[in-house]
Amino acid sequence: MWNIIIFGGLLFLPAWTLNWWRAWVLLGVVVIGTLATMIGVFREDDELLKERLKPPIQEEQPLADKILANLLILTFLGLIAFIPLDVFRLHLFAEPSAFASVLGLLMFIIGWLIISLSFKVNTFAATAVKHQADRQQRVIDTGVYSVVRHPMYAGAVLTMVGMSLWLESYAAALLAIVPIMTLVIRIQFEEQFLKQELKGYDTYTEKVRYKLLPYIW
């Protein structure tokens, strides 16, 4: 529900028009993706749903991650709001080609799917970096976690770049580097934290070599 409100509000309010069919298509994908994730994942995993409904800033969360989480939220929301500003007012670059735009929509859908698959196999996918000792947290190394160690973040990268291209803003696609770099910094912190707090994570990093992008990093 919050996904729909956030995307809808941050796209249509700065645009100051509802006559934007590409945004409606994106919002439709968000609605379908949200419903599919709720039915296919959260309906079968109440504990994960409870964890995902918690605020991104929590008492047991390390200070560094509180800062990074806030930065990530602000830069991600800022990216969404920037897209209509560029499309309807700034026009910083030429519009992407039809091919690039459709490719962007596919990237967004694939990114959303990867995030949902991350939830499907990882019941410990919390909004905050923390050790969930009360839930007997363990290392997850199956499914998408057998490809990269942070598939949820990989999916987020695809959605950020993809929505920018689909909504015809090369400038936003370039601006996406800001939340992406915030993610990269958070990954570095999260890795150090998990190596210290989660038994078996060191072994997992040797088994799955790539953090975010297969064969790259």
Image (cartoon, rainbow, N blue to C red):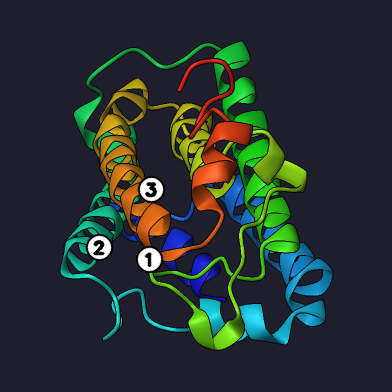
- Tell me: 197 left or right of 52: left
- Tell me: 69 left or right of 145: left
Q: Nearer the viewer, residue 162 or 192?
A: 192
Judge the density around disc 2: few (<14), some (14-19), many (≥20) Cα neighbours within 10 Å: many
Q: Whole-percent x and y of residue 203?
A: 57, 43
| Lower sequence index among marks 1 and 3 | 1
Judge the density around disc 1: few (<14), some (14-19), many (≥20) Cα neighbours within 10 Å: many
Q: Which residue is mark 2?
A: 65
Q: Which residue is mark 3?
A: 191
Taking the spot 82% from the left edge, 79% from the top edge, the residue there is 44
Taking the spot 33% from the left edge, 58% from the top edge, the residue there is 193
Question: Please, what secondary structure does the residue beneath circle 1 have?
Answer: loop
Q: Can residue 150 be seen from the camera position used here?
A: no
* Mark 2 → mark 1, Cα distance in angstroms: 7 Å
Quarter of the image with the C terminus in it = top left
Give the amino acid at mark 3.
Glu
Q: Nearer the viewer, residue 142 or 23?
A: 142
Question: Please, what secondary structure does the residue beneath circle 3 have?
Answer: helix
| Lower sequence index among marks 2 and 1 | 2
Contact? badges 1 and 3 (CB < 8 Å): no
Q: Which residue is mark 1?
A: 129
Q: Can residue 130 be seen from the camera position used here?
A: yes
Give the answer, above or below, for where 173 lies relative to 45: above
Contact? badges 2 and 1 (CB < 8 Å): yes
